[in-house]
């Protein structure tokens, strides 16, 4: 739980809180191009930037609980430019050997190369992205879509079906002949994505991340880490929404009485608090289980589904209780509404994750209550 913390963990929470108030909140309205370099420098100085990076590359490889504490604390201030606080993590390249360690992982962590995660296929793709092995080369054919940050990516970590071997993750440099960026687009939350086509793209087999057939479990582990991260951010945002709503309900309405005196309003407010308490509790339990070495694939899915759905309900109800004023374009609740909606699809749609949690128990006998 967030309550039973060591002195060091309490100091970390205090540092994250101070960082949000001194380095992020004053940058509301500042464009990312000028805000990011300053935030990165301040985050390095505060020891936050390297928390997501491995020790072998100068990082501090923070525990799941430490990362959860910082993400929850930062998001609880609903600050801008949150994505600039942490350095790039290794993602699916964690534990790769040479040559990928030098050619792709090191520059990724140093910030000199950006990458994209290419998992989703366009709805109209005639067949899954596939590869055949020719000597020491893979020849790749297919399409990917919704690659976040793909337009700026030097390489993609892509899931491909290798003939007779199964799914594999492979690193595809975006400058290679046969790789075409077919579309750039933005989503409701304002993030940028790209679609790619691969035509007879030749990639060395040394660019395989693990053996063919291991691709899906590896991708799932990476997605599992990101799911916990999303849940932590949602939980922090829930706390911001509740603080905002509490202040609103304590203030008087047109009659001069506090808005929170109405029983109907109290019922809704109480229900939101119950849901946020449940979401925060399951998040911290899962982070502690992860640090104890447990496999938390199912628990991370449960956290992601519940936290993204709950924060959506909280923002939606807070808008309803606050009234039309909260729907104006620049109102923080209106901005948050757009921001959190995408999280119920990113990193796995809610219903698909529900099915996976069911499969975890019914077919694999995994998953806790
Ligand atoms: C902001 C954002 C960032 C993203 N970034 C990336 C990225 O970097 N890389 C990447 O690869 N992808 C990315 N995605 C894509 C995301 O992973 C997919 O949108 C998501 O996994 C859902 O897949 P889909 O869009 O193909 O929808 P589908 O798989 O077609 O599912 C659509 C809906 O159909 C229903 N459905 C589907 N299958 C089932 C089933 N078996 N049983 C019951 N109902 C079902 C569900 O209601 C589901 O929500 C991103 C998406 C968003 C919104």
Image: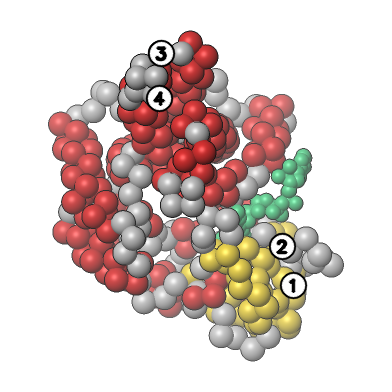
Eyeballing the image, is 204 above or below 235? Answer: below
The answer to whether residue 20 is left or right of residue 180 is: left
In the displayed structure image, the side of residue 343 where residue 250 appears, left or right: left
Residue occupying the point 53% across, 66% down: 192
Residue carrying label 1: 142
Question: Ligand 1 closer than 8 Å to the CB at disc 2?
Answer: yes
Disc 1 or disc 2, which is closer to the eye? 2
Q: Earlier in the sequence, mark 4 or mark 3?
A: 4
Question: Gap between marks 2 and 4, in whole Å?
Answer: 52 Å
Going from the N terminus, do you reach mark 1 or mark 2 first? 2
Residues tagged 1 and 2 counted as in contact (Cβ below 8 A):
yes
How far separated are the C-alphas under marks 2 and 3?
51 Å
Name the residue at 58% across, 65% down: 186
How many numbered marks have been drawn onto this rendered protein structure?
A: 4
Q: Nearer the viewer, mark 2 or mark 3?
A: 3
Residue highlighted by disc 4: 254
4 or 3: mark nearer the eye: 4
Badge 4: residue crowd in 10 Å (few <14, some 14–19, many ≥20)? few
| Badge 2 or badge 3: first in the primary sequence | 2
Camera-nearest label, 1 or 4: 4
Q: CA distance from mark 1 to mark 2?
A: 9 Å
Label 2 sits on residue: 121
Q: Secondary structure at mark 3?
A: helix
Q: Are marks 2 and 3 in contact (CB under 8 Å)?
A: no
Residue 184 horizontal/vertical position (percent) = 61, 73
Of the image marks 2 and 4, the number of the one nearer the N terminus: 2
Residue 343 drawn above or below residue 108: above
Q: CA distance from mark 4 to mark 3?
A: 13 Å
């Amino acid at each position: 739980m967030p309550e039973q913390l060591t002195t060091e963990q309490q100091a970390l929470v205090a540092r994250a809180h101070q960082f949000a108030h001194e380095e992020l909140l004053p940058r509301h309205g500042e464009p990312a191009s000028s805000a990011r370099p300053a935030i990165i420098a301040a985050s390095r100085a505060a020891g936050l930037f390297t928390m997501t990076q491995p020790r072998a590359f100068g990082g501090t490889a923070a525990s799941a609980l430490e990362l959860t504490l910082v993400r929850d604390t930062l998001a609880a201030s609903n600050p801008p430019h949150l994505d600039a606080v942490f350095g790039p993590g290794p993602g699916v390249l964690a534990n790769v050997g040479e040559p990928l360690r030098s050619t792709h992982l090191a520059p990724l962590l140093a910030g000199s190369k950006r990458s994209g995660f290419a998992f989703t296929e366009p709805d109209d793709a005639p067949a899954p992205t596939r590869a055949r092995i020719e000597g020491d080369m893979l020849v790749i054919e297919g399409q990917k879509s919704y690659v976040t940050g793909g337009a700026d990516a030097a390489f993609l970590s892509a899931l491909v079906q290798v003939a007779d071997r199964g799914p594999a993750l492979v690193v595809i440099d975006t400058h290679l002949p046969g790789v075409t960026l077919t579309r750039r687009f933005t989503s409701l939350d304002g993030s940028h994505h790209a679609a790619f086509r691969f035509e007879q793209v030749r990639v060395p087999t040394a660019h395989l991340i693990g053996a063919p057939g291991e691709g899906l479990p590896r991708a799932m582990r990476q997605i599992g880490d990101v799911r916990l991260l999303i849940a932590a951010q949602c939980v922090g945002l829930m706390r911001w929404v509740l603080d905002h709503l509490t202040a609103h309900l304590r203030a008087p309405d047109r009659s001069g009485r506090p808005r929170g005196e109405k029983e109907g309003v109290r019922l809704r407010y109480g229900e939101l608090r119950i849901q946020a308490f449940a979401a925060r509790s399951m998040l911290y339990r899962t982070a502690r289980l992860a640090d104890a070495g447990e496999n938390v694939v199912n628990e991370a899915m449960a956290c992601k589904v519940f936290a993204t759905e709950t924060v959506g309900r909280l923002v939606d109800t807070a808008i309803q209780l606050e009234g039309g004023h909260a729907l104006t374009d620049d109102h923080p609740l209106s901005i948050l509404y757009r921001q959190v909606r995408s999280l119920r699809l990113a990193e796995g749609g809610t219903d698909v994750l529900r099915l996976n949690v069911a499969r975890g128990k019914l077919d694999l006998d995994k998953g806790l209550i």
